[in-house]
Amino acid sequence: MTRERTREMLQALLAGLLVCLFARGASAQASKPHVVEQDVTLEDESDADAESAPKKKQPPKDEDEDEPDKLSCKADPDCDGKDVCKKGLCVPPPAARAEPAQPDSSPAFWLAVGVIQDLAIVSGSQVCTQASQVSGGFTCIRSSGSQYHGTPLPGAAGDIGGITFAATRMTLSSYLRIADSISLGLRLGYAFLGQGPRPDGGNNYLAFSAEAQGAYWFSNRAFSTKVVGTFIELSTGLAQVDGKQKVTVKEDPAAPPPVSQTDNPSQQTLDAYQKSGAGFAGAGFGLFLPFGGASGLIADLRVIQLFPSSGTTLSLGVSGALGL
């Protein structure tokens, strides 16, 4: 009985010990962390720290550091003349900034005072005969100042031809720019030199002249004070031009002398005038030389055809102009 009792107690103790060991093992297994295998690439700690750290702003690089071959200097004269001294080095100068174009504010209306010299192109044969002086537009004047009325020998009544000085005129002009390349003008003049004589029974010399003018300008703007202007012009008006040359006349001894002029020698030198006008039309070219501000010089050269008494004249004009 006792032995049986002891065996049952040992069995119970062994079973309790196994239960305790099993429970302890299960608890240890449950508390053990579950490890999952995974491929992981580890970054260098220093690289990670460098990327995570705030980046520092790099100081600007001096442009001159890339060009060590530049000369050192203290002032502009130390360089070769083309460069300038900057931060101790010779460097090319900065590009010049283009100035904005200024509008052309030259005046549109101009007044001018000047002078014109007429150069008459004369031509004629046997100009001192009575027929040439009555209806040919010629007048022959003796040294005494009177008109010649004698009878020259055939072929000895004088021939003229060439270019000769005629009237010299003072002028007053006005000009108006009506478009960038077009201007209109009005010119008045008075011949204070080169007036021809009054023929017997004829009209006095027309000393006053008047003309209207239109011009086309090749420069950017008519009467611009920024550039030298060039133009072509057409003109028309009133003027008289008398061209003079000296001729030698031989008197016809067989012809009776005129009652009012009995003292003509057998040969004499006369002033032969070719009288032309009083209307004209002309064409020419000219230039405008600005002096700055609102002043300048106008010069033009024209070829003028006069009528109804026919004649051709070169006209050279020079004027000082003031813009208003």
Image (cartoon, rainbow, N blue to C red):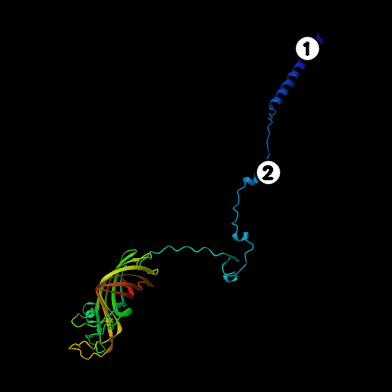
Residue pictured at 30% horizontal, 84% vertical: 246
- Does the image show residue 7? yes
- Position of the N terminus by quadrant: top right
| Residue 120, horizontal then vertical, whole percent | 31, 77
Left or right position of 47 against 323: right
Labels 1, 2: front one:
2
Secondary element at image label 1: helix
Query: Residue 158, position in %: x, y?
Result: 29, 82
Q: Earlier in the sequence, mark 1 or mark 2?
A: 1
Residue 45 tag number: 2
Query: In the rendering, at what x and y percent does residue 36 appear?
Result: 68, 30
Picture quadrant where residue 272 is located: bottom left
Nearer-the-camera pick, 81 or 109: 109
**Residue sitting at 64 percent across and 47 percent down?**
50
Q: Toward which corner of the image does residue 227 lie, by quadrant? A: bottom left
Dot 1 amino acid type: Glu
Residue 98 location (% of width, % of height)? 46, 63
Camera-side residue of 255 and 324: 255
SS for callout 2: helix
Judging by the rendered image, the residue that carries numbered circle 1 is 8
Question: Image quadrant of residue 58?
Answer: bottom right
